[in-house]
């Protein structure tokens, strides 16, 4: 077991640059970067009052507020400070936008799965020689079922005409002579 001991009279080994942390200026470099000049001045005045450098009356006159309004702003600033000191929850937090994206992806995946399963079912029906099930009409938003269209394919119309047409008369060929012996037409047993 190794312990980190130093010999008296010597200094510990200097840390490498990767372990050293750059010193951050007090308050951070980004503090107030996107705030207006008036907001920065007001925050500085409130901090000076809280530190005891200025009185509330001096700070209120310096930023151009009445004493009552100064106390309201100071109270709001302290409430914001307390809110900011609340521990933040760990990990990603659920957001409506992220949930919406997740739900849309799930819907798209389920629609692809549905289309795939429907295709597989149709192929299985065709391979077994089954007729496709009749689609049930879906009610519209007003509650009425859609009217069923009659098929008007030309092939169906022609098939109907051919099926309903009387048998065609025989062609105008001259009659052939019948052999006198009808037994000769019969096949031998």
Image (spheres, rainbow, N blue to C red):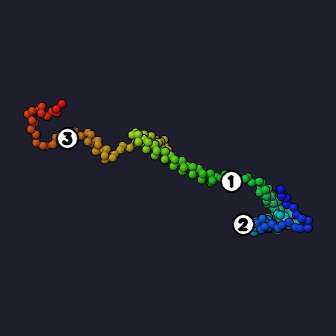
Above or below for 151 versus 26 = above
Position of residue 31 in the picture relative to residue 98 (left or right):
right
Percent of width and height locating residue 147? 41, 42
- Dot 3 alpha-carbon crowd within 10 angstroms: few under 14, some 14 to 19, many 20 or more: few
Q: Is residue 10 in view from this perspective?
A: yes
Q: Which numbered marker is on residue 116?
A: none
Q: CA distance from mark 3 to mark 2?
A: 94 Å
Residue 166, quarter of picture? top left
- Mark 3 lies on a secondary structure that is loop
Above or below for 141 versus 189 = below
Percent of width and height locating residue 180? 8, 34
Name which of mark 3 and mark 1 comes first in the sequence.
1
Q: Is residue 60 in view from this perspective?
A: no
Residue 156, quarter of picture? top left
Position of residue 81 in the picture relative to residue 174 (left or right):
right
- Mark 1 lies on a secondary structure that is loop
Front residue (pair 48, 182): 182
Q: What residue does disc 2 label?
A: 34
Front residue (pair 35, 10): 10
Direction left: furthest residue = 180
Percent of width and height locating residue 140? 48, 44
Name which of mark 3 and mark 2 comes first in the sequence.
2
Q: Are marks 3 and 1 in contact (CB under 8 Å)?
A: no
- Dot 1 alpha-carbon crowd within 10 angstroms: few under 14, some 14 to 19, many 20 or more: few
- Mark 2 lies on a secondary structure that is loop
Front residue (pair 153, 105): 105
Q: Are marks 1 and 2 in contact (CB under 8 Å)?
A: no
Q: CA distance from mark 3 to mark 1?
A: 82 Å
Q: What residue does disc 1 label?
A: 92
Name which of mark 1 and mark 2 comes first in the sequence.
2
Q: What residue does disc 3 label?
A: 168
Percent of width and height locating residue 132? 41, 41
């Amino acid at each position: 077991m190794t312990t980190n001991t130093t010999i008296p009279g010597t200094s510990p080994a200097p840390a490498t640059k990767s372990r050293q942390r750059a010193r951050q200026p007090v308050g951070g470099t980004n503090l107030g970067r996107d705030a207006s000049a008036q907001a920065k001045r007001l925050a500085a005045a409130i901090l000076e009052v809280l530190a005891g450098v200025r009185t509330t009356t001096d700070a209120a006159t310096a930023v151009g507020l009445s004493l009552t309004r100064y106390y309201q702003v100071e109270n709001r600033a302290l409430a914001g400070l307390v809110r900011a000191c609340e521990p933040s929850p760990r990990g990603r937090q659920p957001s409506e936008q992220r949930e919406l994206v997740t739900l849309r992806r799930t819907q798209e995946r389920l629609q692809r799965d549905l289309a795939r399963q429907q295709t597989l079912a149709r192929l299985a029906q065709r391979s077994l020689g089954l007729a496709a099930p009749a689609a049930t009409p879906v009610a519209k938003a007003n509650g009425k079922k859609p009217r069923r269209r009659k098929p008007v394919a030309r092939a169906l119309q022609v098939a109907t005409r051919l099926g309903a047409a009387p048998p065609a008369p025989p062609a105008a060929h001259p009659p052939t002579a019948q052999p006198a012996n009808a037994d000769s037409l019969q096949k031998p047993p």
